[in-house]
Amino acid sequence: MENSTRYGASSWRPSISGLVICEGKQLQQAVEVHCRFDRLRFRNGGATLAPDPADRLTLVPSEHDMHPKLQIVLVLAFLTSPGCRDAGKPAAALQPAKAEPVASDANLLSITLTPEAQQRLGVATVEVTIRNTSVVRLTSGEVVNAPLGAAGVPGVSTSDFAALAGRQAAADAELLRARAALKLAEQMVQRADALLSEEAGSARSRDEAVAQRSAAEAAFTAARAQRELLGPDPAAIHGKAALWVRVPVSATDLPRVAADQAASIGAPSADAPTRKVAPVHTLPTANPAAGTSDIYYRVDNHDQAYRLGQRVAVALPLKGPAQGHAIPASALVTDIHGGEWVYRQTADGHYQRRRVEVARRDGDDLILARGLVAGDEIVTAGAAELFGYEFGTGR
């Protein structure tokens, strides 16, 4: 809807309370305004006129000139309205992607300490060296129950101990029956020998007794082997001094693993203590669905540090030596995002933070994958203080 409203400036004096002009032009002595009125009120005595926001308003004076105040208000509104300055210009298209520069490791701060500050903080440096270390593969394993005999199958933590206890009870009964049968067969052989020596029995009877004894020995051996395969009594598992660790290894990595060398296990945390475990040779087990084969290690559990079913971190030794840059563990600082850093001494009293990547831990030292070169001087004592000073927490 478009209206044209004419107001004579000689008959009344309008007062403008609010106006947003989108387009306006001078036509001789008239001002034609095409706009979208957000707030507009014309007052003539007690009446208030409120045009529709979609109307076109034409202000035309009658026989006299336009009122000066009305001219000033319209001109100021025309000049200060952002819609008028931008009228006719297309809106900027929204970019689908935007790239902004970010801070990089090359823009890190350099910290300079006076000799007094270095002495007060106790700053000490060490040179990065190259060390010959064994290559390891970090993986995970599970603490399992060691079998009763050398030919037994280790029990996993997910075993149904109730069903296992039932099978063990049946195997124990069979073993007792086989032992009793073997004892009876030995007595029959002794009796047949005595009768044969006194010429009261026949050689055939003695041979039959010997055959029965052999059958009883075979049954006893089979019953004992079956019992060993079922492992120890579930009640004796708690507090056991010797446990095994089952490590599933991918079929592609299995040829590279030095299965005859000792491995290291520990809790799945960076600062957890580790201990050596010796490999054991047992019946091979595998998981065809996952494509893994199992390697077993024996762990000394006299201190009861590990429990059945516990997940542990395992460092498997690989075949062949390797070299790596070694730094003390005290030189490493970690930020809130998990980034690993050290402070490298660029000059006497000048230190700069350098990003590194730790490959593994070797005792009290860390073997780096990248970040430093041999001969770099890094801070070992006072790194935390430098880190706190750089980010303001130590001030």
Image: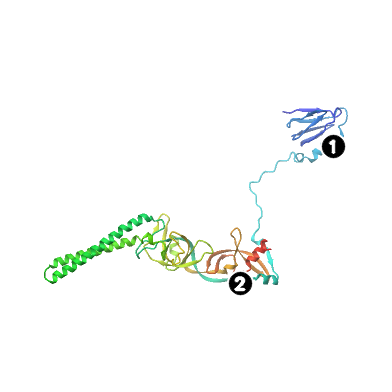
Mark 1 is surrounded, within 10 Å at the Cα level, by few (under 14), some (14 to 19) or many (20 or more) other residues, namely: few
Q: Nearer the viewer, residue 183 or 53?
A: 183
Q: Nearer the viewer, residue 244 or 189?
A: 189
Q: Is residue 33 left or right of residue 361?
A: right
Q: Nearer the viewer, mark 2 or mark 1?
A: 2
Q: Is residue 233 left or right of residue 92?
A: left
Q: Nearer the viewer, residue 182 or 3?
A: 182
Where does the N terminus fall, quadrant-wise?
top right
Q: Secondary structure at mark 1?
A: helix
Can residue 379 be seen in the rendering of this structure?
Answer: no
Tell me residue 245's x, y (percent): 43, 63
Q: Is residue 254 left or right of residue 225?
A: right
Q: Which residue is denoted by mark 1 in the rendering?
A: 72
Tell me residue 309's x, y (percent): 44, 59
Tell me residue 250's x, y (percent): 44, 59
Q: Which residue is denoted by mark 2 in the rendering?
A: 126
Say above or below: 53 vs 380. above
Can residue 220 be seen in the rendering of this structure?
Answer: yes
Residue lying furthest right: 64
Quadrant position of residue 366: bottom right
Mark 2 or mark 1: which comes first in sequence? 1
Quadrant position of residue 31: top right
